[in-house]
């Protein structure tokens, strides 16, 4: 097994996760079996309890693990299916160590960061290597070198390299090489200092990945090579991408990243054939058509909160030879009277997932507008619950219809809690999570788009469609076109006589890839194109 650890220096938000993902793409194209994972030094056991404003989207895996959004990049850029083993946090590490201590596993010993915490981290790496099918494991370390929280991880990795040998374990350090306007110059000092910090811990990077807005010239590379003690060809620039993140593998390949990594790890592989990937990027960058899709959500100002949705729309756009321009609409500011003007420019409307009451009425108004004006509507998770509330209120005449999440004692709880959820006390990892099967209604829009009658999709929600209202709502034209195999849970709803009105209780966005766009997203973008005419 070969191991690549990706650390970050100078600042956060360097695109480390993207770089790790892109390297994964390149190694896969060289014929290697790759797995990418993340270590997050924060103390939460998982990001499931964090606000999107803190942490961006929570990405959900097949097995129900709630993980960092970088795992979304990893799954989109490579073929590896990830599991809960692939996002290790300090919270999990300490939870295990303390549990072991209580069990008496370290009987007699003083339990310490070294060796107990560091061993726990190393054990996890070995567990992943044993259980998962891969030849190369790329691990991104969250945070920035020098963070107090990150130290046990880096110490564990230093030991790990010693145990496994430098020919099997390498470090890639991603840093910022800033451009100082006044001096009209790139500056390498922050990188030098961040590498010095890493070396203080005992880790010498094998590759430095320089994130920069401007070309990192020969003399910068020479300087970095000398001060950071590595060959000049291992100083690699990673410039801002012009068009799409999917260019990253192509750019990093031009810079020789995959060749150098394989050399360092003694991996004898073929040159990667990136033709298909390049064609896919071309389709994304130069499409013939264009549509505008309004995303009505409450975390709209945040680039990362709906990451997988934006990516899935991009994939679906490329599949339809179409550029999807996203109009971001803040549901909290959306009042019913402004809906026609604000949504007039949109060819289609998407309502993403969400929690809590804030911004709900704006979303209901947007759903109503889409239904009444035959505008394509796609609801995801909360977006399905909103569609249900809107239809119940305005078509079935169920005044005050709502979800019990927003109105505990309302007259018509059309979205409710299942009995088993009522007993849940802990907030962490207690929702309906991960992959669940659904059976589709023959001839429905969902069936036509998927081309099959059985699907499995990823979930992350607590509330469900209330089956007590099923008959009344179906009688009024609200079609339940997807249900759990036992028929008790509603998974997909549609309005048949509408050009495209589809809402799902799950998150199809987590299974869309640039190389395999999700059929519901593709159908939605196609409907937006048709609506535009
Ligand atoms: N808040 C809703 C629920 O818990 C929807 C969740 C979501 O959109 N992910 O059921």
Image (cartoon, rainbow, N blue to C red):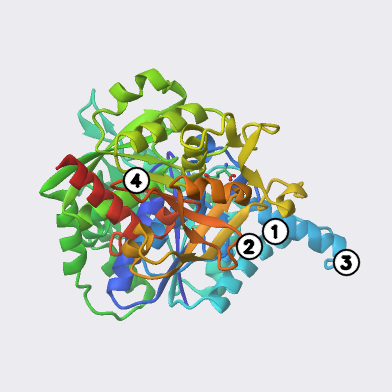
State the separation of the CA atoms marked 2 and 3: 20 Å
Choose top left, top right, bottom left or bottom right for residue 147.
Answer: top right
Q: Residues within 10 Å of mark 3 (few under 14, many from 20)?
A: few
Kindly identify which residue carries mark 4: 310
Quadrant of the displayed image that contains ligand 1 = top right
Residue at the spot 55% in from the left edge and 63% down from the top edge: 484
Is 252 positioned to the left or the right of 488 in the image?
left
- Which of pointers 4 and 2 indicates the residue nearer the eye? 4
Q: Secondary structure at mark 1?
A: helix
**At which x and y percent is residue 528?**
24, 45
**Res 245 visible:** no
| Disc 1 from disc 2: Cα separation | 6 Å
Q: Are marks 1 and 2 in contact (CB under 8 Å)?
A: yes
Q: Residues within 10 Å of mark 4 (few under 14, many from 20)?
A: some
Location of mark 2 (residue)? 121
In the image, residue 420 above or below residue 411:
below
Q: In which image quadrant can residue 296 be found?
A: top left
Q: Secondary structure at mark 4?
A: helix
Residue under numbered circle 1: 117
Disc 4/disc 3 C-alpha distance (Å): 51 Å
């Amino acid at each position: 097994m070969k191991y690549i650890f990706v650390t970050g220096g100078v600042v956060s938000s360097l695109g480390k996760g993207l770089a790790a993902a892109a390297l994964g793409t390149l190694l896969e194209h060289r014929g290697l079996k790759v797995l990418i994972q993340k270590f997050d030094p924060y103390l939460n056991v998982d990001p499931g309890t964090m606000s999107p404003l803190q942490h961006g989207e929570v990405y959900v895996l097949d097995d129900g693990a709630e993980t960092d959004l970088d795992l979304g990049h990893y799954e989109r850029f490579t073929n590896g299916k990830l599991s809960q083993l692939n996002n290790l946090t300090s919270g999990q590490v300490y939870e295990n160590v303390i549990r072991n201590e209580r069990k008496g596993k370290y009987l007699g010993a003083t339990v310490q960061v070294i060796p107990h915490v560091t061993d726990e981290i190393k054990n996890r790496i070995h567990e992943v290597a044993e259980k998962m099918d891969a030849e190369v494991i790329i691990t991104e370390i969250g945070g920035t070198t020098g963070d107090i929280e990150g130290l046990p991880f880096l110490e564990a990795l230093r030991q790990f390299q010693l145990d496994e040998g430098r020919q099997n374990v390498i470090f890639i350090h991603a840093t910022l090489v800033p451009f100082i306007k006044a001096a009209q110059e790139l500056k390498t000092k922050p990188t030098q200092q961040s590498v010095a910090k890493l070396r203080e811990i005992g880790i010498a990077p094998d590759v430095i990945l320089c994130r920069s807005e401007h070309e990192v010239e020969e003399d910068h590379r020479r300087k970095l090579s000398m001060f950071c003690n590595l060959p000049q060809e291992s100083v690699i620039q990673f410039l801002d991408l012009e068009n799409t993140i999917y260019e990253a593998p192509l750019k990093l390949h031009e810079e020789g990243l995959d060749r150098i990594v394989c050399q360092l790890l003694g991996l004898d592989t073929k040159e990667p054939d990136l033709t298909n990937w390049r064609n896919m990027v071309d389709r994304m960058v130069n499409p013939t058509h264009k549509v505008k899709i309004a995303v009505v959500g409450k975390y709209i100002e945040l680039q990362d909160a709906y990451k997988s949705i934006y990516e899935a729309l991009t994939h679906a756009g490329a599949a339809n030879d179409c550029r999807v321009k996203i109009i971001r609409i803040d549901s909290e500011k959306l009042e019913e009277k402004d809906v026609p003007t604000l949504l007039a420019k949109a060819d289609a409307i998407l309502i993403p997932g969400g929690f809590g009451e804030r911004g709900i009425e704006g979303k209901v108004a947007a759903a109503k507008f889409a239904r009444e004006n035959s505008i394509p509507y796609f609801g995801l998770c909360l977006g399905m619950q909103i569609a249900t509330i809107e239809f119940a209120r305005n078509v079935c005449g169920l005044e005050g219809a709502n979800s019990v999440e927003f109105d505990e004692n309302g007259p018509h709880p059309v979205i409710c809690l299942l009995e088993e959820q009522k007993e849940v006390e802990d907030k962490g990892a207690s929702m309906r999570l991960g992959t669940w099967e659904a059976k589709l209604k023959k001839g429905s829009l969902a069936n036509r788009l998927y081309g099959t009658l059985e699907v499995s999709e990823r979930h992350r929600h607590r509330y469900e469609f209330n089956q007590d209202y099923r008959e009344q709502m179906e009688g009024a034209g609200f079609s339940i076109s997807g249900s759990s195999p036992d028929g008790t849970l509603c998974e997909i709803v549609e309005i048949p006589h509408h050009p495209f009105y589809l809402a799902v209780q799950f998150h199809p966005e987590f299974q869309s890839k640039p190389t395999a766009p999700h059929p519901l997203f593709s159908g939605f973008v196609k409907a937006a194109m048709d609506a535009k005419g």
